[in-house]
Amino acid sequence: MCVLGLGLIGGSLMRAAAAAGREVFGYNRSVEGVQAARFDGFDASEHVDEVLGRAAETSALIVLAVPVPALGLMLGHIRDTAPQCPLTDVTSVKSAVLEQVRSFGLLDRFVGGHPMAGTAHSGWAAGDAALFVGAPWVISVDDHVDPDVWAQVMTLALDCHAVVVPARSDEHDAAAAGISHLPHLLAEALAVTAGEVPLAFALAAGSFRDGTRVAATAPDLVRAMCEANSAQLVPALDRTIELLTAARHTLARHGSVAELVESGHAARMRYDSFSRPEIITTVIGAENWRDELAAAGRAGGVVRSALPTRDSRRRSRRRRR
Ligand code: NAD
């Protein structure tokens, strides 16, 4: 496996994959990051074409773990050096990445991914082999995806002890706008608002800390995520502004925020009791497998242990005969 970008996510992935017994090597732009990874005993290099040449020779699964603005550069190198390798990514937006991969002619071997795990820190030193344990890892089931590559990405996610959520890229982006990108913008707005009130930081405790935690993320990363998902984030922001405007109105006119507080509390209770049934019946590569997985993911289903592929089914039938 070949990881491009050994920051928080790529570095965690390298550690988790190695801990699962996989052979893993990677590229990092900064020499400091490479040296730090090597010092910790990992196989890293700052020479992207050399790393990709090795990926091509070994048919390694390539994982793009760089921020959105760097994707084009990496995809250009992959197209030139390792176009036949299976390819995935960890980017927080999926439709924009899909379009970029398509524009580089690499769609056939690409299956998008997004591990829903992270911290507000960056770089190799922030990585942690246990980052993905129990985390949902979205793997895209768009119409083009190849069953063999999908199974490889599923195995990687399960090796990192994540649970796999199959989803179409556009549905992922609408959901990610609501549960990730919108919270980032709300956290920034909360931090700004409190920062303008004298004494506020002196009194700040749990609510402020929890509500603004993600505002500590590097601004470039937040911008990259939000701006690349504007098509889905704008309607989510509109809905929030509508709710807040209505709450402001009832508070100013009638001294009540009951409607927003009660519907917000009810939604949060629904989240707390949300069940995650295991997906066990789908055979990867069988007829309608992508639609089946997308429907199961939409209903909250997750893959906790490897699903069979059409080929593995055939092999086990032959063995039984
Ligand atoms: P990071 O800053 O810790 O690491 C980014 C890596 O990309 C570094 O190795 C950096 O050297 C490299 N990089 C940056 N610009 C580059 C360029 N122009 N050319 C080559 N390499 C470049 O960031 P991260 O948190 O690991 O984020 C990486 C990806 O993971 C992003 O796409 C992000 O959307 C996604 N992601 C982040 C989180 C999170 O919580 N941070 C969670 C899930 C997914």
Image (cartoon, rainbow, N blue to C red):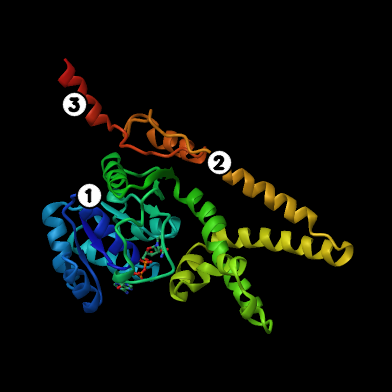
Image spot of residue 104 (x, y percent): 31, 60
Q: Which residue is mark 3?
A: 315
Residue neighbourhood size for the residue with mark 2, other residues' Cα within 10 Å, grouped as few (<14), some (14–19), many (≥20): few
Which residue corresponds to mark 2?
274
Residue that protrudes farthest toward the top in the picture: 321
Q: Which residue is mark 1?
A: 20
- SS for tag 2? loop
Seen in the image, is 29 located left or right of residue 204? left
Q: Quadrant of the N terminus?
A: bottom left
Query: Which numbered disc flags the more N-terminal residue, 2 or 1?
Result: 1
Amino acid type, residue under disc 3 in the picture: Arg
Rendering coords of residue 99 (x, y %): 40, 58
Whichever of labels 1 and 3 marks the residue nearer the N terminus, that label is 1
Which amino acid, by three-letter code, is at mark 1? Ala
Q: Nearer the viewer, residue 227 or 194?
A: 194
Residue 246 higher or lower than 313, as above or below: below
